[in-house]
Image (cartoon, rainbow, N blue to C red):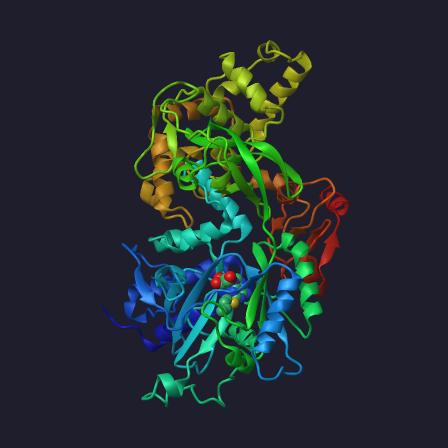
Amino acid sequence: MASASPEIQQRATQLRQQLQKASYAYYVLDEPIMEDAVYDRLYRELEELETQYPELIVPDSPTQRVGDIPADKFISVRHNIPLYSLENAFNLAEFTKWQERWQRHLASIPDNFEYVCELKIDGSALALTYENGLLVRGVTRGNGVTGEDITQNIRTIQTIPLRLNLDNPPARVEVRGEAFLPIDIFEKINQARATAGEALFANPRNAAAGTLRQLDPKIVSERKLAFFAYTLYIADAEKSQPDNLQVPGISSDEFFNPTTQWESLELLQEMGFKVNPHRQVFQSLEAVADYYNSWDNARQNLPYLTDGVVVKLNSHELKEKLGFTQKFPRWAIALKYPAEEAPTQVENITVNVGRTGAVTPLALLQPVELAGTTVQRATLHNKDFIEQLDVRIGDTVIIRKAGEIIPEIVRVLPELRPENSQTFQMPHNCPECNQPLVKPENEAATRCINASCPAILRGSLVHWASRDALDIRGLGEKIVRQLVEANLVNSVADLYDLTVEQIASLERMGTKSAQKLVNAIAESKKQPYSRVLYGLGIRYVGKVNAELLANYFTTIAQLAQAQTANLAAINGIGSEIAQAVSEWFQIPANQTLIERLQAADLQLAKSSDRETSRQTQSLAGKTFVVTGTLPNLKRAEAEDLIKQAGGKISSSVSSKTDYLVVGENPGSKLEKAQKLKITQLSEAELRKMIE
Ligand code: IVH
């Protein structure tokens, strides 16, 4: 094979730099500078050059983030510098005591000392090592002394640079920070897991930790972890590299040497890391208290979970003087928010059979107030979860609600366990159809696999009618149950044969409401192909995947005939999803279903461009961000309206944003929009624009 000419080498370098800059702007700065399509084209060009001339591949090439080969296990390694944890304070009194303590530890109290306050991100700590600017190792916190080498996985995190953005990097740099899952991504992952009948993650922290320990870096990459850096160590060249004093970039006058935590954070940012923007320096305890109190409310609007603020002395010199106790640094403390937890009693445990056949145990609780809502039930996920918690009927448990996460049981109070408490056994037979349940070895879920189980049928109908699928108003759980019990509906296709008389024959149903429902069902035939695909409830095919599939295979016939390999070739569709889609279309009952939907005139192909342009597209070409609580519309509803009118939705404000739709308690997006002088709209103004 010929080797790459100097021109080709140059082009590869240029592509790498352009792509690196674009993804830095997109992921770290939140200010995209390149259209996705352009990025994809340049990325493919680089990939092609690298395939043709493998000698062009360098470890920090943007194409090298996701490794091909899953690990069989992770190797335990010793940290270069141990990872300490932080002492907690839950109120101002404890915080004041901490200040007194560190001051007592010093011979004299320094004047003008400063505190840096940072948000305490609720994720997993990571330690990253860079040698001569290149990321060489990434390790989990583990027990603080040893952790697991998960470098392959860490490389997939886009907010972690593969190479530091420094001309003369020091020989060795250690960076620590928190890997976490933004709340919306966490929710999407759990939705997909629910669709696939897999055990749900209890909260974003568990999901992040679980993801980091995934053996397959492809899965890690799909999960889209994020990272905030907060600690920087620059190895002392003279001590650690005695033979290597001449390494370029080591001379201290050339290299900016931080003397405070604040400067370290700024330097981390310059190096290419994302550093949390809400950091602040304060000179007094009172100012720290104000920061802590104001974030207790404001944190509700953050797209990630925080559980407190971390207060650190700013001066590195002072930190060095104070050092560590057995467990904690003396120079920092976590001021935590009390978790929203409450005790209650488990009155009973039942099971619910979902549309995938997954049998989910549910705890029925004595109603309890928590974070402004009454909680009466909590999911127990699956058999393993119940066993791990050892929760029994009659137990007193602590339930928790964090951010916008559904309530969960966090622990049992065994000392309050009554003598007559009862353990719960998963049923052997389906409570709905009495067929034996199965629990596949490699899955957490117990399932009913009877294709004609009425619970599965009801679940599929409710899903089909749901807002994001065919959006059939008035077809809720109650009517679905009646239709199934009256044997009027045995598949979603039967909905389209229902007559007003049939529906009116159901209990508590008048002719008028029956007519309304028939109309709503007829109306759903206009819903686009991607929604139909989503509505079919194929395993792993959530909203996002349905749209992806509809874009690549623009008719259902094409999709049904697609080879698994062609499906898996779509960026974002993994092999598991591809497999599930192929298998679904091979089942004769599903083929019949598609034929019947076709006969009923549902949209089974992507509407042609001509058709879309005929619709009113009053917001075409404009990008919108929605923030805060709107008076009438839920955020998702506002976003749907915008999309239907041809507008684009973005989750973050940047110079590309045309309008910010603002409701109550808008948070940091509003500030950013004001800075960028972006036009703001109320809900009413948005509606006017659409009309
Ligand atoms: S500093 C010795 N800063 O909180 C200094 N930690 O409870 C230790 N954390 O293990 C860490 N946000 O996982 C620091 N801004 C922040 C943090 C933070 C979250 C986590 C970190 C640490 C735990 C201690």
Q: Residue at x 30, y 73 (%)?
A: 4
- From this viewpoint, is residue 59 visible? yes
Q: Residue at x 71, y 60 (%)?
A: 678
In the picture, measured across the screen, residue 667 lies left or right of residue 160, that is right
86, above or below 343, in the image: below
Image spot of residue 236 (x, y percent): 42, 84
In the picture, measured across the screen, residue 417 lies left or right of residue 474, that is left
Image spot of residue 212 (x, y percent): 40, 56
Q: Residue at x 37, y 73 (%)?
A: 80
Image spot of residue 189 (x, y percent): 47, 45
689, above or below 109, in the image: above
Place residue 174 in its image quadrant: bottom left
- From this viewpoint, is residue 31 visible? no
Looking at the picture, tell me which residue is in the foreground, 593 or 433: 433
Looking at the picture, tell me which residue is in the foreground, 542 or 127: 127
Looking at the picture, tell me which residue is in the foreground, 319 or 668: 319
